[in-house]
């Protein structure tokens, strides 16, 4: 039996960050991981998916840059090299995580942990087992794809992990679910040459974003030949030697669509089962999530939980943030979570990004707001990039024009949103942003221009 100060279970972006911060706070730390360092994000999620998205963009641009004077012929996609490149990127990042853990003197233990009591776990790795006694624990076990009973995962019925490791670019691909993962991977494969159909049960795709933002994405999907079917219910799938036949119902009519593969992306389930948490006395919320306070402490005072297993959006950077808060709370600091300035990004084509309140959310909270939009089409840099679709929208409190939210749709939105998060964190007003000099010509200028619209002094569009 080994005694440690802080035990972290799960080595994804929440767990390994929590372990590093705990070590920095002078704690003796051990981290347990049953599968791979870096978790889903680094190995079969965020990072490899962005590789395919980036490759898709380059392939698409190479084929369709005639209007900019770049006329290319014989453009080919070497899928084997694409997969090799993806594996190389993942390997570098996972190796970096291991080096950081070892450099911070954190013991790495492979195996699956289950609780004996509130201060003891047993870690099993094959035929080997070890018992650990700890003072505090951080649960960072992440989530896994939801499997629909009528769409059991096979070689042809795949989840997001399978979609990242296909041996070929499918000629036809059906995506069940029009959320983050479905639209990102659907867009990527459309750019890579697949004929993509997205089937969504709700009224629209990307429900977490404002409709005026998703309309721009839908326009881009249509341009790529992607068929988006909303208000549809996926009924079942039949496999044959060539692929699959998916049956769905839309508008009261049952229809079918054929494809090489069907990608099921209808959500993720928290990994909170088979750990013995109920026996320890940890209280659950809905859908298998764990109840925590503002320091990520569960109902058992010495056990903390972060990331996909607690409420809120399933975002890697949210998990990392919570990991730091939990480690600092264990060390006696007064750190608490504040989610207002946590951004959400969807790497569609074009990208979507939001932080803080949108207009509807602010009004629901009883906050009087002023909003302003500035179009990408009025920015010099977007014109030089030939990516003029999109806009920046700012949401400020009416009484003092303090920024409380921002939404961006367009090329580079994922990078631009950070400035808006900083502005919210520091309590900047629209005037503060308008007075911040931005280099010209850059995408960043669009945020300043939007702020000028708020204060009634727009420069590069006419005042309404």
Image: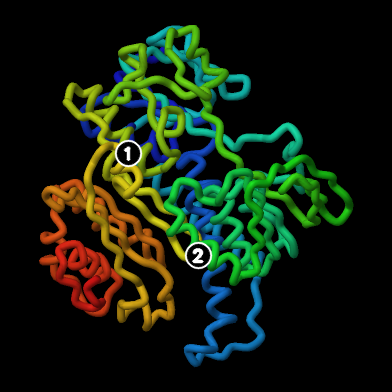
Q: Which colour scheme is used?
A: rainbow
The structure residue drawn at horizontal position 43% and vertical position 13%, both measured from the top left corner, is 283
Left or right of 321 on screen, residue 307: right
Q: Percent position (x, y) of residue 190? A: 63, 65
Q: Residue at x 51, y 50 (%)?
A: 206
Residue 418 lies in what quarter of the image? Answer: bottom left
Between marks 1 and 2, how big is the CA–CA gap?
30 Å
Q: Name the residue under label 1.
A: 364
Compared to residue 306, the image places residue 425 above or below, namely below
Q: Does 377 sit left or right of 143 as displayed?
A: left
Q: Tell me: 412 left or right of 63.
A: left
Could you tell me which secondary element the residue under label 1 belongs to? helix
Pick the quarter of the image with the C terminus. bottom left
Q: Residue 12 sits in which quadrant?
A: top left
Which residue bears the numbered disc 2?
Answer: 349
Relative depth, front residue between 46 and 370? 370
The one of 270 and 182 positioned closer to us in this rendering: 182
Query: Residue extending furthest right?
Result: 241
**Pointer 1 local density, CA inside 10 Å: few below 14, some 14–19, many at least 20:** few
Crowd rating for badge 2 (residues with CA inside 10 Å; few <14, some 14–19, many 20+): many
Which quadrant is home to the N terminus? Answer: top left
- Percent across and percent down for residue 111 are 53, 26
Say whether residue 79 is visible: yes
Note whether 386 is above or below 147 in the view shown.
Answer: below
Instruction: Give coordinates of residue 74: x percent, y percent.
Output: 66, 85
Give me the residue at 61% from left, 58% from top. Answer: 186
Who is closer to the viewer here, 408 or 29? 408
């Amino acid at each position: 039996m080994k005694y440690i100060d802080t035990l972290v279970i799960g080595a994804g972006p929440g767990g390994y960050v929590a372990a590093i911060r705990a070590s920095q706070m002078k704690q003796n730390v051990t981290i347990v991981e049953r599968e791979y360092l870096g978790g889903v994000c680094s190995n079969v999620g965020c990072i490899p998916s962005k590789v395919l998205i980036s490759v898709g963009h380059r392939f698409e641009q190479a084929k369709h840059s005639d209007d900019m004077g770049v006329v290319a012929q014989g453009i080919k996609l070497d899928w084997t090299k694409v997969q090799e490149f993806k594996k190389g990127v993942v390997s570098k990042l996972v190796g970096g995580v291991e080096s950081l853990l070892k450099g911070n003197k954190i013991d790495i233990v492979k195996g699956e942990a289950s609780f004996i009591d509130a201060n003891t776990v047993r870690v099993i790795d094959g035929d080997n087992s070890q018992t650990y006694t700890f003072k505090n624990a951080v649960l960072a076990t992440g989530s896994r794809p939801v499997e629909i009973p009528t769409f059991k995962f096979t070689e042809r019925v795949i989840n997001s992990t399978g979609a990242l490791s296909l041996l070929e670019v499918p000629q036809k691909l059906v995506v069940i679910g029009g959320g983050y993962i479905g639209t990102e991977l659907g867009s990527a494969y459309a750019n890579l040459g697949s004929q993509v159909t997205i089937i969504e049960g709700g009224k629209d795709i990307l429900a977490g974003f404002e409709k005026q933002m998703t309309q721009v994405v839908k326009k881009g999907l249509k341009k790529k030949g992607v068929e988006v079917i909303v208000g549809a219910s996926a009924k079942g799938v039949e496999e044959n030697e060539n692929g699959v036949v998916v049956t769905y119902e839309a508008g009261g009519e049952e229809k079918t669509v054929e494809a090489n593969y069907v990608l099921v992306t209808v959500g993720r389930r928290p990994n909170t089962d088979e750990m013995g948490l109920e026996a320890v006395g940890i209280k659950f919320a809905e859908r298998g999530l764990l109840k925590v306070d503002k320091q990520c402490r569960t109902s058992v005072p010495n056990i903390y939980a972060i990331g996909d297993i607690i409420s809120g959006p399933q975002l890697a950077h949210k998990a990392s943030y919570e990991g730091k808060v939990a480690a600092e709370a264990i060390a006696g600091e007064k750190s608490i979570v504040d989610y207002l300035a946590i951004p959400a990004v969807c790497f569609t084509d074009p990208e979507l990004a939001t932080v803080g309140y949108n207009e509807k959310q602010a009004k629901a909270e009883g906050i009087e707001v002023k909003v302003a939009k500035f179009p990408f089409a009025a920015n010099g840099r977007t014109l030089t990039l030939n990516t003029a679709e999109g806009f920046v929208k700012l949401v400020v409190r009416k009484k003092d024009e303090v920024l409380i939210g921002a939404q961006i749709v367009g090329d580079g939105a994922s990078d631009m949103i950070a400035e808006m998060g900083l502005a919210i964190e520091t309590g900047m007003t629209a005037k503060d942003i308008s007075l911040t000099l931005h280099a010209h010509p850059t995408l960043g200028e669009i945020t300043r221009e939007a702020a000028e619209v708020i204060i009634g002094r727009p420069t590069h569009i006419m005042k309404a």
